[in-house]
Image (spheres, helix red, strand yellow):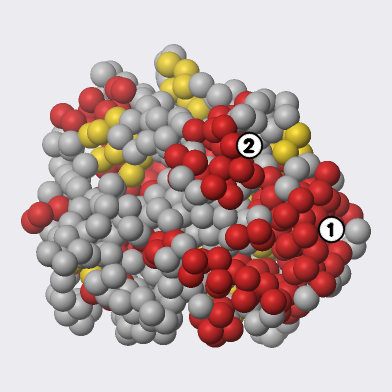
Amino acid sequence: MHPRRRANPHPSLRLIAGCIAVALASASTAAQTPAQETPQPSRTAPYTIVSPPPTRAQHAMVVSVHHDASDAGIEILKAGGNAVDAAVAVGFALAVVFPQAGNLGGGGFMLVRMHTGAAHFIDYREQAPAAATAAMYLDAHGNVVPDASTLGYKAIGVPGTVAGLAYAEKTYGRLGLARVMAPAIRLATEGYILSDEEATDLAAARNLAAFPASRRIFQRDGNFFKSGDRFTQPELAATLRRIAADPKTFYTGAMAAELAASVQQGGGLLTAADLAAYQAKDREPLLGNYRGYDIVTAPPPSAGGIVLLEILNILSGYDLARAGMQNITAPDMPLLGDRTPQQVHLIVEAFRRAYMDRADYLGDPDFVPMPVQQLTSPAYAAAWRKSIQPVAPSPSATLTRPAGFLPPPPSGAYLPAESTQTTHFSVVDAEGNAVANTYTLNNTFGSGVTAGALGFLLNDEMDDFTAKPGVPNMYGLIQSAANAIAPGKRPLSNMTPTIVVGPEVCPPGPSLQCKPGKPLLVLGSPGGSTIITTVANDIISILDNGLNVQQAADAPRFHHQYLPDVLQVEKAFPLGVVEKLRASGYTVSRANQADEHNPGVWGSSEMIYIDPKTGTLLGADDQRHHFGKAAGY
Ligand code: DON
């Protein structure tokens, strides 16, 4: 199956209510590549996403949550680097200019797809220190100790970012670490100008205030940074120079010793031996198919790819484009387009089922066996589909997994904590190499701890493990024993860097000389448990609904994660649709899932779409945050 050609709604960043006519026929006719560039005629919707136009470029593009980091990527591309060089440059630059989530002291995933078709998933997720135990966040009575896994030294997992970025550069880059780290070193040495939003983030962070070095560096000991101030980080600059000269110092050299000593002084578990044992892992990405496109995505220890493919597999049995138009004939139909009641219903039912499987089966693949193939098989999705009602929701409590596909799940449903900040960036170079990278400190500014005199923040990723069965976290996401804490284990993640790829191009006849498909879409997002539904909705908005990439990023989000059995929608989500969904039986919560500085919104899609007809790159920097940039040339 192929995506359908649909009209591009109007550009700007509001929802517009109006009225009417639609090329209904186009909903059921087939199979064209979505035309992002060429506006389609005839679809005027009563509600539409109004966004600025995507940023256009002819050769290469970098999209990240911070303009200085995007510019760093472009500088490296123009210096002859490939997409991996640029991505490594952006990763180090974000560690300077976006301390909320950009990091040296955290971890993440880099998905690389070269123009040859070869794809690699670099897993640089943090792992539990050797001294970690399954019950380490429980008190003598077996109760979870408040904040123990989110604030301070005991929350820190072995950081993976430096290993991951250095491995990526060495294995797939061209220019070498010293060159690609130069922009980050410059930004730390010379400083960068803080926007109002960034200054507010720094001043408001209670976890930074709790630790003297963090309070000194990021909050000027209470004389808080203001909008327009230049923020220089000399200690971080020195650390970056040392890493650029020899990245091994972070794991086995003098820096490792300093880092371990500073964490142990604070009561944390991290040792020099933990750092020496850490390795980034080059894993096979997961591969699926949706509407004729390959979906290259995150394998475990992310839950992201499995859940994403399960969602898309379930939905590929529906004509979602038609579902998006269906109510047009009903006079009381409130809204039309990317967020219609009928379409939202089908998507939510797919979310619910896929998250049920996430809850029961997933963990670190190096520690627990997982039925990945079965979970992502179209036959399993087809069996799930049979349980979806045409209009009414299936209550999560009554959901029964289709029999005969999966082994029994590991015992004990555990409830892990989620968090509020992470960051994603996307890069495409002039050769068609693409990188999707999502990395994190977990909570905003991580554990709040700065690594001694090294000038960088450390993660609280241990919180992504299960602390105790049956204790709800702030988002109520459920997981199984597969994600219990164990020494050296990596906590289950939702981060879902993904690349959507067009079909192979084969000459007519029995030739074996097919060319690999070209990347169509490079994407990912932060958002804790909402990451996977954000990525799924972005793909659906573009492939099924014909939104352009910026409109897809800006469309009001909705999320369901099986439990709690609540459909969560952003505050901008159309009320008329909420009413329809409530009438059909959904419990809907508006503005429930809060970004602490921007209640009622979540996620940040930083995406690149490559128009398959013209090759033009179209970048989308999510408008929910105000200092990002899609930069291209
Ligand atoms: O790996 C994970 O799934 C989480 N640590 C990500 C946290 C996150 O996305 C918070 N962002 N808004």
> Could you tell me residue 162's position as x and y percent?
65, 69
> Could you tell me residue 610's position as x and y percent?
69, 51
Left/right placement of residue 433 relative to residue 150 reads right
- Nearest to the eye among marks 2 and 1: give it: 2
Residue depicted at 56% across the width and 80% down the height: 272
Residue depicted at 25% across the width and 57% down the height: 145
Among the two numbered marks 2 and 1 on one chain, the one whose residue lies closer to the N terminus: 1
Crowding near pointer 2: few (<14 within 10 Å), some, many (20+)?
Answer: some
Left/right placement of residue 186 relative to residue 392 reads right
Residue depicted at 15% across the width and 42% down the height: 392
Left/right placement of residue 157 relative to residue 233 reads left
Determine which residue is flagged by label 2. Answer: 220
Residue depicted at 49% across the width and 59% down the height: 459
Q: Is residue 214 shown to the viewer in this render?
A: yes
Q: Which labelled disc corresponds to residue 39?
A: none
Q: Which labelled disc corresponds to residue 182?
A: 1
Q: Amino acid at mark 1?
A: Ala
